Image (cartoon, coloured by chain):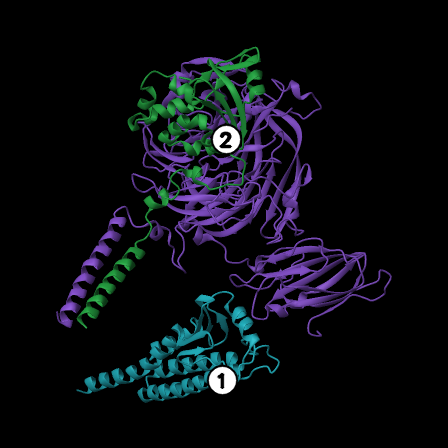
Amino acid sequence: MKLTNYLTLFAVLFAIVGSACTQSNNNNGALGGSAAEKVYVAPGEQDEFYAFLSGGYSGNLTVYGLPSGRLLKEIPVFSQFPTSGYGYSEETQPLLNTSHGFIPWDDLHHPDISQTNGELDGRWIFANGNNTPRIARISLETFETQEIIEIPNSAGNHSSSFITENTEYVVAGTRFSVPVPQRDMSIDEYKSNFKGAVSFVEVNEETGHMDLSFQIMMPGFNYDLGHPGRGESHGWFFFTTYNTEEANTLLEVNASQNDKDFIAAINWKKAEEYIAQGKFTTMKTEYAHNVYDESTHTGTSTMKKEVRVLDPTELPGLVYFLPTPKSPHGVDVDPSGEYIVGAGKLSASLTVHSFSNMMEAIETENFEGEAYGIPILNYENIVAGVVESAGLGPLHTEFDGRGNAYTTFFISSEVVKWELGSWEVIDRKPTYYSVGHLMIPGGNSRKPFGKYVVAMNKITKDRYLPTGPEMEHSAQLYDISGEKMELLLDFPTHGEPHYAAGAPAELIAPRSKKFYELEENNHPYAVKSESETRVERDGKTVHVYMTTIRSHFAPDNIEGIKVGDVVYFHITNLEQDFDVPHGVAMIGANTSELLIMPGQTKTFRWDPDRVGVWPFYCTDFCSALHQEMQGYVRVSPANSNIGLSWSLDGE
Amino acid sequence: MIASSLLILGLFIFPMWNILLKAPQYPDGIGMDIWINKIVGTNPNDIQNINLMNHYVGMDPIPTEMAEFVVFPWVIGIMSAIGLGIGLIRKRKLFLVWFVIMSVLGGIGLYDFYSWEYKYGHNLNPRAPIKVPGQSYQPPVFGYKKILNFEAYSYPSTGAYFLFTGMFGSVVAYFVDKKEEEDDEA
Amino acid sequence: MENLIRKITLGLGVLLLCFCTKVEQQDSASLENNTPLGQASVVDEDSEPNILQIAIRSEDHSTLVAAVQAAEIEHILVNAGPLTVFAPVNSAFEALPEGAVEDLLKPENKAKLTGVLTKHAAPGSYDLAGLKKEADRGRRLYMADGSYLTITVEGDDIFVEGAKVIASVQTSNGIVNVVDKVIL
């Protein structure tokens, strides 16, 4: 053979192999491309969805991009956060105030995005604190916590912070029933003496401000999760209960006895009527309401003293119990509002109730009994269907808007796709490992965006490089656009995500704020230009009115501070440019650094405890001369007569 | 001719010139609009941000007061009034004279612009934190120039187009008027 | 020379093939098969053994382990639990009617087998004392398949639905109570 022949042979070989190669890639792509392609968001490109994952015991909310799984931000909500100074700055400390005083931590569970007409509107996201019962509202323009309201008569605010379909209310059901009002009594007397408060917090349509409207004092069960009715069932709210045995010890056994617990269906429109008719009692209590004002960049805490209470045992038509097998955890309402899915966590099956059946049973008074005067509907009459042997340990269900539901099973460690109406299992995919909650963007609204589901797993084990005994939890992303689910991606999550909420990027991104207008800064200690910067003494208290701009503090030399003074540094960032924060930290300050956004003012307190000359500096690499951004404070003895002086470059 | 005189008043309503700076950290660009009586940012905080960057290399802040801001409006105002006058009396040859004067004034204006830019880009504070030997920061009068990591674009803005149209209009007016007269004669 | 060219050509062809294989991206099917047994695939020689590992190490439970593997429910026995498994010994399976075990192990009977096995698992931790307590209170034991089993105490012996508990082992994720009968 001649050389040319070999070259021809090679060319032919190349062509064959090449085409085979292309073809085999295409074959992979027959299912819609490879997993890698589907999650690849090229550098400079942005994700399709926002995902807000609860941080559980971190107390915070994390923001991820989907499908890439990129971590975009950690939003401090219930926990002090040195990264920004949240909960450390004088302005944000009031946000963490409660009737128990300043509590710098909570267990954040169930974020929910505000809705209008049952569809995501992307204005705010609500989140609940489980430990010291609280609900927070976070702005989706600034991605900052704007408001926190404490929930009185409650303990373990678990069935929260779910919203009604026009964000009329955000709810809070107590996980632990407690004596109401709290009093000194024997724990053994729990049964029939403890109460479970379910709270409805009104949300102002314009400002988002929250106001505890009323509480329904329910029997002493454990209220686990909740979801609103929508469409036809708008006006109703559904809560799961467990421990209807009312056990007060070794609940893992004693609260697992009843064959069925309840889903409590609460008619909140009816509650509004009773409130309007004055059929409530006003109860003395105490709870904090904390509001952050974006104009003054300052939070305030007010202590509220009263709450209106409705008694469901006295008010007919307010609450009905839907018997549901074995300690139901999740209660999820499909996009139409007709189906109410109860996930009995010890059951191998899923129970789906029908709202129209429920209404009919109520109308015909088809009750199988009552509990504490609250009618129990007849299970056989209200159930729409059962998803048989779907898996072990069902927890949560979300919907894709195409007639399918997706349920997590903790024990059998899988996501199961099933069809509403036929109750047939369509597909199941393993999770790695032991999935808790799952999230489809808008998956608990009238309009889900059924492209992806995120499964949030409780157990990580060997999924990533080991990091010692403690590891981050792991999430998995599945493509659900086809008949079968398709695993795309693993990514670690922060804290313990209990639930998540997601929304299309175009709903939120365009309204994201770039910086705060300096002109609109009404902080009482703000200064708008370097010429206004100064230091003022009021007895032992010293206020420093300071500014930052690339790349200096003004003033940066301060003298006349004395041991025993209390010094407040009020720092205004004069920048008016996207993404030019400055930070500040002072040696020996018993607090965190502060990160100050352009146009914002933040304050930290410093108690100089010894004589000397002490530096402060910018903690954020703000500019080319960041490392030069520093200053000194001279601290003189308490009895010194050195007067206050301040300067920048000798001026 | 009357239209020409009024068109140049467009300089009072629209900016004359625009300098746009692009860099990786400013993907949308930041810029300044030069009016006959002021310089403002293309976006609300652009001037502050340009000054902030420029102070590192020792450039002066963009002026808020300049002799030109006082003189230019008067010159344009007076030239517009004169144009209006000669338009009304319809002295055709004066149209051309007006055009020539405007062109000379325009040339002076551009030279003034260049010399301000030269001073702005070369007159650097010796105490500047960043010194690049031999580097000046003068933006172009017209067109594109790369200044360190910034891409600077300098082009006439709406006001200038009104000015050009007005000036061109005076020449057109001259010929139209001449043609009408010839037609009348014919 | 010709040989050399031939070799080069073949070499290039092989290289091309290799390259082709390499650029083929991982599809989701292979992603899901990378740990076919779920959490049961986790290699961990250091922690206390879990229910599955205890069962595998016990020679007397080889039939049970084979059944668990046939039902592909290994991952359930390594789950965080807590789970109480009533583990019939091999002789318990042998006592079943002729062919019953073989029948259950057939692939088409996987669902039935899973049902039988999950009837041997209760959510929660029930050691001997715990079982006695439940019996004393007259409670039945709720099993993972949804059924309830009766606990009886005769002297020192505990029976679950007639199956005698002959040993109890604490594991990292629950309790294995060894029983002498298969509970059907």
Tell me the number on the disc at residue C81.
Answer: 2
Q: Which chain did the renderer colour cyan?
A: B
Instruction: Determine the residue located farthest toward the right in the rendered image.
Output: A639
Q: Are marks 1 and 2 in contact (CB under 8 Å)?
A: no
Q: Are marks 1 and 2 on the same chain?
A: no
Which quadrant, please, contains the N terminus of chain A? bottom left
Residue at x 62% of width, y 55% of height = A522
* Quarter of the figure with residue A431: top left
Q: Callout 2 environment at 10 Å: few (<14), some (14 to 19), or many (20+)?
A: many
Asked if C30 appears above or below A316 in the picture, the reply is below
**Can you tell which of label 1 and label 2 is closer to the viewer?**
2
Task: Give the CA separation, mark 1 to mark 2.
Answer: 77 Å
Asked if A548 appears above or below C158 in the picture, the reply is below
Chain of the residue where label 1 is placed in the rendered structure: B
- Give the residue at mark 1: B118
Asked if A509 appears above or below B65 in the picture, the reply is above
Q: Which chain did the renderer colour purple?
A: A
Q: What amino acid is at disc 2?
A: Gly
Does the rendering let one see residue C137? no
Q: Which chain did the renderer colour green?
A: C
Circle 1: element type: helix
Residue at x 35% of width, y 88% of height = B94
A447 relative to A265 in the view: left or right: left
Chain of the residue where label 2 is placed in the rendered structure: C
Q: What amino acid is at disc 1?
A: Tyr
* Quarter of the figure with residue A607: bottom right
